[in-house]
Amino acid sequence: MHKNTIYLCFDGDAEDAARFYADTFPDSAVGAIHCAPGDYPGGKAGDVLMVEFTVLGLPCMGLNGGAHFEHSEAFSFQVATTTQEETDRYWNAIVGHGGQESACGWCKDKWGISWQITPVQLMRIYTHPDRAAAQRAFAAMMTMKKIDIAAIEAALAGR
């Protein structure tokens, strides 16, 4: 057992979510699957109750706690990417698997978990010494859903 684990609630599909994350992200895996030892409100003995998994090396626990637990943008996984291909791959996996696009590199997966698919180049624009260039790049990013690294770089350069 880890000292600190990200604990996420699902509506009966924690195992499906864990398997999707393990298939999508490196350094991710499904660990132990714990079944209910007896009947409980909303489930029966033998149903999958909890799933241990890792996402990008972070230990997580998925609980099939029911529909009354909802996710919000107050929690998100941030995935740092280094290329447009990597950005596209993760974004398209999440959005293309029943998820939703949001703004500025944010999206939600089909289970309602928020993700920030964030190219490392974005940190460079926030801290760029030329504040006018940083503002141009930031303004360009604010119009995007999935981040377009080339467009950010062009805005930074004033093109």
Image (spheres, rainbow, N blue to C red):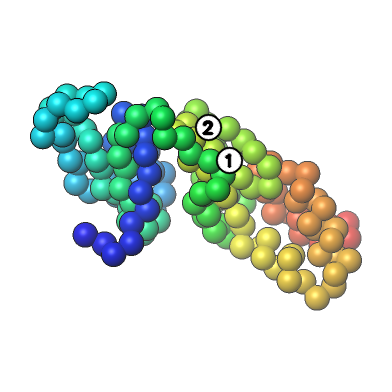
User: Foreground residue, 101 or 64?
Assistant: 64
- The answer to whether residue 85 of the structure is visible from this angle is no
Three-letter code, disc 1: Cys
Residue wearing tag 2: 99
Q: Secondary structure at mark 2?
A: loop
Query: To which residue does mark 1 refer?
Result: 107
Q: Residue at x 41, y 49 (%)?
A: 25
Quarter of the rendering occupied by the N terminus: bottom left
Q: In the image, what residue occupies the spot 36% across and 59% down?
A: 57
The x, y position of residue 138, in whole percent, is: 78, 57
73 over 152 or under it: above or below? above
In the picture as drawn, the residue positioned furthest to the front comes out as 41
* Residue 67: quadrant of the picture: top left
- Seen from this angle, which residue lies furthest bottom? 129
Q: Residue at x 55, y 57 (%)?
A: 81
Q: Disc 1 or 2, which lies upstream in sequence?
A: 2
> Which of the pair 31/91 is nearer the observer?
31
Provide residue 148's location: percent of width, then percent of height.
Answer: 70, 49
Crowd around label 2: few <14 · some 14–19 · many ≥20 (10 Å) = some
Asked if disc 1 and disc 2 are in contact, CB closer than 8 Å, the reply is yes
The quadrant of the rendering that contains the C terminus is bottom right
Task: State the image coordinates of residue 98 (x, y, percent, origin top left).
Answer: 50, 28
